[in-house]
Amino acid sequence: MSTPGFIRDLRAHIGHGLLFLPGVSAVVLDDAGRVLLGRRADNGLWALISGICEPGEQPAETAAREVYEETAVRCTVDRVLLVETLEPTRYPNGDACQFLDICVRAHAVGGEARVNDDESVEVGWFPLDGLPPLREFALARIKLATEDGPTWFAPGGEAPAAG
């Protein structure tokens, strides 16, 4: 996965220590109600498009940028679905990160879905009743995107279930 330059600069000073980083995940829907997914190059799993906010970048800008960079699809952000601090992650190189995930619902407005960088090995549109195997993380967020409920904020517990 591509590590932003500002994080490489931080790592030069702090080593593998825990970084708390703002990130976004995007549930991108098209006019047919299908969801855009990418099959990750690092683990081979299907997932929502996601990424790290650059310094000074607004979360909606991050979502639109990441979706385009990874899939060549242009989108506009409709609303915030969820705000949740995720469990810390340790990467194979020893780096530790904990992400604040701001999940947004977005609508595709142009472009053709394709692999557009090295973070995905496959990209595609999927009907809600024909999703590939996904982790609970993605399923719960897709469920929120298809409901008219309020933004979900973690009340000190776990993210909402997909079921």
Image (spheres, helix red, strand yellow):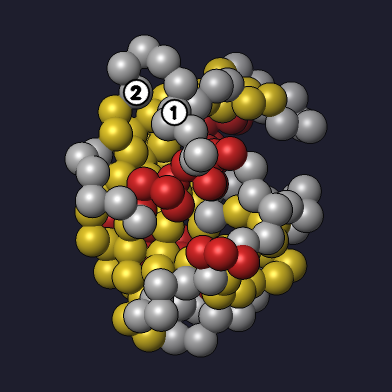
Q: Is residue 56 left or right of residue 45?
A: left
Rendered residue at 53%/46% (across/down):
139
Q: Quadrant of residue 154?
A: top left
Q: Is residue 40 left or right of residue 68?
A: right
Which element is circle 1 on? loop
Q: Where does the image place residue 66, in percent across and percent down from the top left?
A: 46, 61
Q: Quadrant of residue 137?
A: top right
Q: Where does the image place residue 7, in percent across and percent down from the top left?
A: 52, 38
Q: Quick check: can you spot residue 92?
A: yes
Confirm or deny contact between disc 2 and disc 1 (CB under 8 A).
Answer: yes
Residue 27 higher or lower than 14, as above or below: below
- Front residue of this view, candidates 53 and 145: 145
Q: Where does the image place residue 121, in percent across and percent down from the top left?
A: 73, 67
Outermost residue, top side: 156
Task: Count residues near mark 2 (Cα–Cα under 10 Å), then give few for <14, some for 14-19, many for 20+.
Answer: few
Q: Which residue is mark 1?
A: 159
Q: Where does the image place residue 35, in percent across and percent down from the top left?
A: 48, 67
Q: Amino acid at mark 2?
A: Ala
Which element is circle 2 on? loop
Q: Which residue is mark 2?
A: 154
Rendered residue at 48%/33% (across/down):
161
Q: Is residue 3 left or right of residue 79?
A: right
Rendered residue at 28%/69% (across/down):
76
Q: Amino acid at mark 1?
A: Ala
- Front residue of this view, candidates 134 and 121: 134
